Image: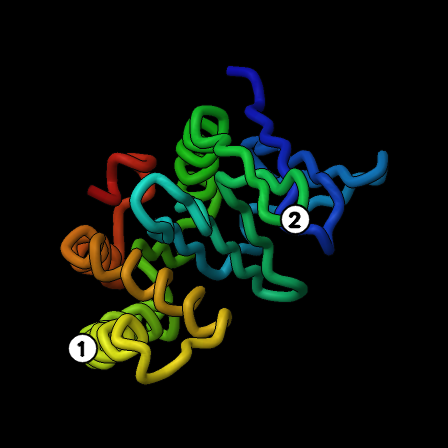
Amino acid sequence: MADPSYTFRLSQFQKEATYRATESALFCTIDGKETSLPLAEIRSLRVYDSPSMGFASALVAPGFRRCVIRPRHGRTIVLSSNHFESFGRFRDRHQSFDPFLDTLLRRIAAANPTAEFWAGMPMGLWLFWIVTLIGVVVVTPLLVLLIVMAAMGKIEIAFPAVIAGVLLLGILFRFRSYLRALRASRSRRFDPKLGLAGIG
C-alpha cells in the first residue's frame, strides 16, 4: 500500500505543508524541508468536527474536520480539512483529508498501542459553543426589541451592532443543527483500528 499524503495550509500565518504517513512515522514537508515524527512518540490524538457559521445561504465561517496530534515531546501538530486560500476564503478538502486521516489512525494504532485516541471537541471549545448558544437565547429577545424600537424611530442602531445581530440571527436559525452537532461532539474515546469508522 502506497503511503498516503495530504497537502493543505492551516492559516494565513502558516505555509502550505505536505504530510505523509508511513507505517512508522508522520513526515511533514514545508518549502522543501522535511521533518518527521515517529508514530511511537505520539501521546494522544483528537479528531473533531466544527460546525459552520452563517445566515441563510451566506457562509461566514465554513465547517471543518480537525485532527490534533500531541507528541510526547515537541509541538502539537494540527491537521484540518479546510485549506486556507486567502483572507475569508477556505477550500474544503474533505475528499483527500478523510482517506489520509483514516490510514493515519490505523497506522498509529498499529505502531503505538499506548497512544490515546479521542473523538469530539476539546472541553474548552465545547463549552464555548454551549455558552454561545445560551447567549443567543438570552440576547435574541433584546435584539428583537431593539429592531422594533429602531423601526419606530426611537433609537438608532450602529452598523457593528447590525452585523452582530445578523450573526446572532444566523445562529438562531440554525440552532437545532448546532445542538445536534454539539451532542455528537462530546469528548469520548474511540477505537483507531477501525479508522474514522471507529468514531461513529
**Which of 186/107 is in front?**
186
Q: Is residue 107 rendered to the left or right of residue 195?
A: right
Q: Is residue 149 rendered to the left or right of residue 106?
A: left
**Which of 148/195 is in front?**
148
How far, Cα to Cα, is label 2 from label 1? 33 Å
Q: Residue at x 35, y 68 (%)?
A: 165
Numbered disc 1: secondary structure: helix
Amino acid at the residue labelled 1 = Pro
- Considering every residue shown, the one lying at the far right of the view is 32
Location of mark 2 (residue): 87
Rendering coords of residue 181 (x, y %): 22, 53
Q: Which image quadrant for residue 168?
A: bottom left
Location of mark 1 (residue): 141
Q: Is residue 93 above or below residue 188?
A: above
Instruction: Identify the disc placed on residue 200.
Output: none
Q: Say which of marks 2 and 1 sits in front.
A: 1
Q: Is residue 67 rendered to the left or right of residue 55?
A: right
Amino acid at the residue labelled 2 = Phe
Model colouring: rainbow
Rendering coords of residue 192 (x, y %): 33, 43
